Image (tube, rainbow, N blue to C red):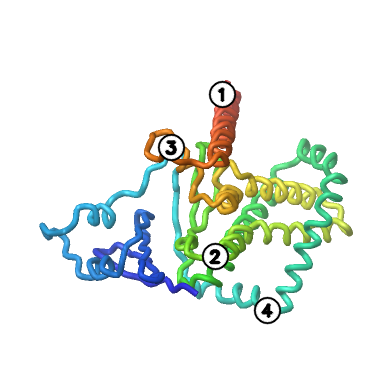
Amino acid sequence: MLDVRHLKVEQVLFDYIECDEEVYIFNTNNERMVQSTSEMIDYLREYEPGNNTNDPAIDKFIFGAGKRKLLEFKLKGFSISKTFFSVFLKFMDAPAVTTIRLILTGLGILLLPLFFQRGLADYFTEIERIDWKVLVIVYISQLMITMIHELGHYYYYQKYIRSDQFRFGFLLRYFFLFMFYTNVNFMDQLSKKKQLKIMLAGVQIQLMISGIICLLMLYVSSRILTLLFFLNVLNILINLVPFIKTDGYWIINLLIDSQDYMSSFKSWLKREKKDIKRSEILLSLVNVSVIFYIILTGVLQLVQLFL
């Protein structure tokens, strides 16, 4: 297991891990990561602000702004102590709970096609006559499910990387997609199998919740359950799409052995990189089309709203 250690320089907090002879350092202030050696840690420990001998590149790493992305705006980030989730983590680790989780996940997969086909007509009927009270209940419920999804990532992450902080936040992607995110720093140093477990953890949790909803729908007829079921399924599908930066995006990168196929594609277009995989080119072209569609659809909806 990898241990995350901490270091503070001029009120800027750094997380870092030592892996073999290399050190990976994450600046929690501007969310930049560097790969270096133990000498970098010694340098940061003895860092003196205003010293003329300081390396400008390291000064920029410490105090510089985060990387600006045209299509991604991080709205707010949070850091919560792992002890806050100690009860949740112990509960999830209990053998009986683990068995129940697997059963419910299996039911969520097996019953999903049945309820999807049976309830599709009901869903469109209910969505047309939905009132604001039901909408608020469903929205809050879906928000909680999404937060549990992120906790699922952290649950598996902390099994392989010992960190005393759960870092997460909210972002706006492609101008119109409001999303949660979880910082799973240093995950690249794990085996592909462990990385895949972390990436799939959120969807696994949602399939478990889908199993619970399906069990309830076997005995209870409820418009709230129907709406929640379909919104949860939609959320699962969105998370598995490999063309926007959700779980599916990073899963496909792992499967094709790429760090970030869109970054690779951009570097190739700028002639900064000579070699690129065909799969990276194909995925990037589809990715650009999907992003264009999302932005165009959002703009059209805004125009219709105001005209």
Query: Residue 140's x, y, as percent?
Result: 64, 53
Q: Residue at x 82, y 47 (%)?
A: 116
Query: Tag 2: residue type?
Result: Ser
Query: Tag 3: residue type?
Result: Trp
Q: Between marks 2 and 4, how big is the CA–CA gap?
A: 25 Å
Q: Between marks 1 and 4, how big is the CA–CA gap?
A: 52 Å
Report the number of discs: 4
Which residue is under mark 2?
191
Q: Find the residue positioned furthest to the left.
A: 52
Q: Which mark is residue 94?
A: 4
Tag 3, which secondary structure? helix
Query: Tag 1: residue type?
Result: Val
Q: Which mark is residue 268?
A: 3
Tag 4, which secondary structure? loop
Earlier residue among tags 3 and 1? 3
Viewer-side residue, 232 vs 58: 58
Which residue is under mark 1?
303
